[in-house]
DNA sequence: GCCATCTGTAGCAATGTCCGTTACGGATAT
DNA sequence: ATATCCGTAACGGACATTGCTACAGATGGC
């Protein structure tokens, strides 16, 4: 994704960061209803999103009373580029079209566009890879302190 | 852009690169119908897209017989990041949601996500900025030579 | 001046994606 | 046992984008 597009897709990334930070800050498991309250959405939306993260091994969902979601690993072992790859799968920034192959330009332009997009997307993900969830949590905690109503 | 295509959103960037390369390679003005033939789409779609590029000063559209579209500047003066900014306006990678501000995490997480997205988007655009339309055209010409049916 | 050519744009149907919601089955602490 | 909570299917609505028709306006060639 990327920068290119991502209208709604990016909301999913933002929500994912939000939820993971919430799980890191909170002690004990968080129910989808509690999380949905913080995100301002529906619990099912949260369960759907965290289902993806659970299959990737980032969180654990437990059913039953006292259940909810927990981080599956320490925050410093979750890199933001991994998260973005999970969430934005398929929404590459340089999605390409299907030109007319009988035109000499159309026949080759797809490869050129792919090369450009791959390079830019790599730079995007490398920037995300420089930060982990632990960095995010540190930032969140710092801002929570400084705006505490007291 | 057929029905089976995956991400529709970023196709506009790919088509823009395609069209600009076509304009650079072709001598004289190109009609929207000719361009649409190369892109495999409808002439109106081309006119809509090139309308945006025209307002940004990248191309010139001339009405009437012998009319069509021309590049408004030399290819080396069109950087790909400018093009992407034009096309993907609004679809920034930093799209964020609207959390519950009564939650201490929700209250601050938007700023954190914005910071992350801005940084990654900057890296994306800087990668694009390293290339101009002239580089694209050189690449296209090279590939046209090597796959010429002869 | 007349006319054929082309852009510029509005309007509309079709398509696809994502979200929010309801509903229900299954798992599990107590 | 039972209340709690996840997992998932299903459905409607909101929204974006594309493809298309139609027509007004500009313009070069005769």
Image (cartoon, coloured by chain):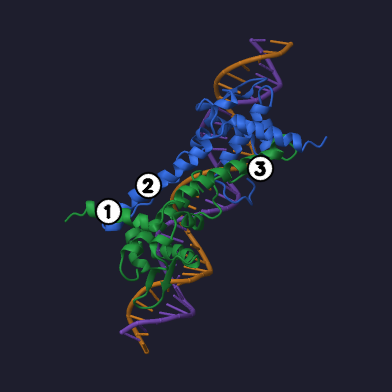
Chain colours: A green, B blue, C purple, D orange
Residues B83 and B8: in front is B83
Q: Which residue is mark 3?
A: A111
| Separation (CA) of disc 1 from disc 3 | 45 Å
For marks 1 and 2, give the CA distance: 16 Å
Q: Earlier in the sequence, mark 1 or mark 3?
A: 3
Q: Residues within 10 Å of mark 3 (few under 14, many from 20)?
A: some
Q: Position of residue B7 (x, y in %)?
A: 57, 49
User: Which structural element holds mark 1?
Assistant: helix
Q: Position of residue B95 (x, y in %)?
A: 42, 47
Name the quarter where the C terminus of chain A is drawn: bottom left
Cα–Cα span, label 3 and label 2: 32 Å
Residue in the image at 53% along x and 47% along y: A122
Q: Which residue occupies 58% across, 26% down?
A: B76
Residue extending furthest toward the left: A150
Mark 2, Cα crowd under 10 Å, few <14 / some 14-19 / many 20+, is some
Label ID, residue B114:
2
Q: Position of residue B144 (x, y in %)?
A: 73, 35
Q: Nearer the viewer, residue B37 or B93?
A: B93
Q: For mark 2, give the secondary structure.
A: helix
Question: Measured along the vertical axis of the image, is residue B40 above or below residue C29?
Answer: above
D4 up-or-down from A132: above or below: below
Q: Which residue is mark 1?
A: A142
């Amino acid at each position: 994704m990327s920068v290119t597009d991502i209208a709604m897709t990016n909301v999913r990334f933002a929500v994912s960061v939000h939820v993971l930070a919430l799980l890191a800050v909170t002690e004990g498991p968080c129910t989808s209803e509690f999380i949905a309250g913080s995100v301002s959405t529906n619990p099912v939306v949260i369960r759907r999103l965290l289902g993806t993260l659970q299959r990737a091994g980032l969180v654990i969902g437990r059913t039953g009373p006292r259940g909810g979601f927990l981080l599956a690993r320490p925050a410093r072992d979750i890199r933001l580029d991994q998260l973005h790859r999970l969430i934005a799968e398929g929404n590459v920034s340089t999605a390409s079209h299907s030109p007319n192959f009988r035109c000499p330009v159309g026949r080759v332009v797809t490869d050129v566009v792919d090369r450009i997009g791959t390079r830019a997307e790599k730079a995007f993900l490398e920037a995300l890879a420089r930060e982990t969830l632990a960095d995010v949590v540190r930032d969140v905690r710092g801002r929570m302190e400084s705006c505490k109503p007291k």
